[in-house]
Image (cartoon, rainbow, N blue to C red):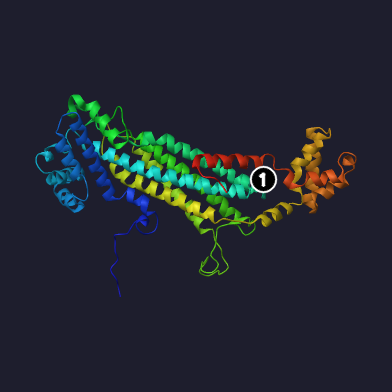
Amino acid sequence: MHHPISMSNSCPLDYRYGRADMKAVFSEESRIQNQMYVEAALARAHASLGTITEADAKEITRVASLDVVSVDRIKEIEKETRHDLMAMVKAMTEKCEGDAGKYVHLGATSNDIVDTATALQIKGAMEIILKDVEDFIYTLAVIAKRERDTLEIGRTHAQFAIPITFGFKIAGYIAEMIRHRERIIECMPRACAGKMAGAVGTGAALGKNFFEIQRRVMQDLELTYEPAATQVVGRDRYTEVICLMANIATSIERYGTEIRNLQRSEIGEASEFFDVKKQVGSSTMAQKRNPMNSENCCGLARVVRGFVTPTFESQVLWHERDLSNSSTERFTLPHVFILTDEILKKMNWIFEGLEVHADKMLENIESSRGLVMAEPLMMKLTEKGVGRQDAHEIIRESAMIAEDQKRHLRDVLLEREDLKGVLTKEEIIATMDASNYVGGAREIVDKMVEAAENVTGRTVA
């Protein structure tokens, strides 16, 4: 028996990804409402300069609401006009009492309204992202402080290097996210820019009051504005903000990749929370505990980056403007913001429940049979007067023997005749204590936790 299949939910954002708050920013209703807010702000600017009456501006402001102008009526008019913005203008005009309808959209071109409304959407979206980032910074700081002294092996080229602490690893993430926070704050005035400058940016239809109308509209809406527009605001602004979201998403993928690696069966140093009572890791392998949420974040981050190329291409418009950017931006802006918000919140949740296996971290350090302490041993020899290059060769030779014979590096060193009288057994043992060789890791954690407290305004317990 065949059942009818709905075609209304063809995009995963419709049924799988995205939080309600961010989706609301980019909903069709939000877009139309923001456009009406801009029309109302334009009317108020005109009234403030005496172009129209205060009563007319008040009436236009009254009808600039979805409680007065319905989406259905706008859609009905659009079928005739084949122009979505003019359909909204006509719908607003219909609802105006008296002569106010004559002054809806006075002196403006469509993209004055569209781009300025988009700036309002971007502003709302960036405020959500900023809050996401600050919440994540705080979560990271809690872990960094808690795991300040938790020894872990540092890895380079996916090979054992020298000891760090897990808190130190997280401190690096804090520093990165603080930089993203700074970028958001710096970018917002550039990204949240509208225009009220007419068909090609000269403001001719707005007359002698052009500059003041534009200034007052944007002040009313708490936006910046394009000082030398074409028919649109410069798309370099959109490129900057989309690239910033891609940058943030890539950081999230980096953290997700680290969790996925640390959760590998042969490493086992950290893992996502797993509900052992209900959660299923595999439909056939009942023992599985997979880092599915981290994998999900990594995959979605790649989708975010995928929107960077069409964003750059939409920057290249013919003359004072063509329409090739419009269809692209209907995809890029909502998808990028919705998915970046999604993975920020998800990664925050992952870290809130992250299981840190300190015993396994220590076990992995010890599994190296002292080889990871080659560097401090070399430095200790230089303190004893051995030349740096000679010290390096002594430790290198010993490490190769230890690795080949599957012995502890300490035992190989104790057998070397050329080290007798240079290093005592006690000195070798103390030098090979991993907890004594993490440099300024703990202090770096303290500094980054303090920095996190400063930017979030929250004390880390």
| Front-most of residues 212 and 329 | 212
Q: Is residue 101 left or right of residue 338?
A: left
| Front-most of residues 239 and 380 | 380
Q: Tell me which corner region of the image, top left, top right, bottom left or bottom right, holds residue 34.
A: top left
Q: Is residue 134 left or right of residue 220?
A: right
**Is 67 located above or below residue 15 in the figure?**
above
Looking at numbered disc 1 in the image, what kind of residue is underneath it?
A: Ile
List x then y, in percent, for residue 194.
30, 35
Q: Is residue 92 left or right of residue 231?
A: left
| Front-most of residues 177 and 297 | 177
Considering the image in quadrants, where does the N terminus appear? bottom left
Mark 1: few/some/many CA within 10 Å (<14, 14-19, 20+)? many
Residue under the point 14% across and 37% down: 55
List x then y, in percent, for residue 188.
39, 36
Q: Which residue is mark 1?
A: 164
Residue under the point 12% across and 39% down: 100
Residue placed farthest to the bottom in the image?
1
List x then y, in percent, for residue 195.
27, 33
The answer, for residue 392, to whether it is visible in the render is no
Q: Secondary structure at mark 1?
A: strand
**Is 224 located above or below residue 29 in the figure?**
above
| Front-most of residues 248 and 354 | 354
Residue under the point 62% across and 44% down: 168
Residue under the point 24% across and 26% down: 211
Q: Is residue 54 left or right of residue 193?
A: left
The answer, for residue 144, to whether it is visible in the render is yes
List x then y, in percent, for residue 276.
55, 67
Q: How many marks?
A: 1
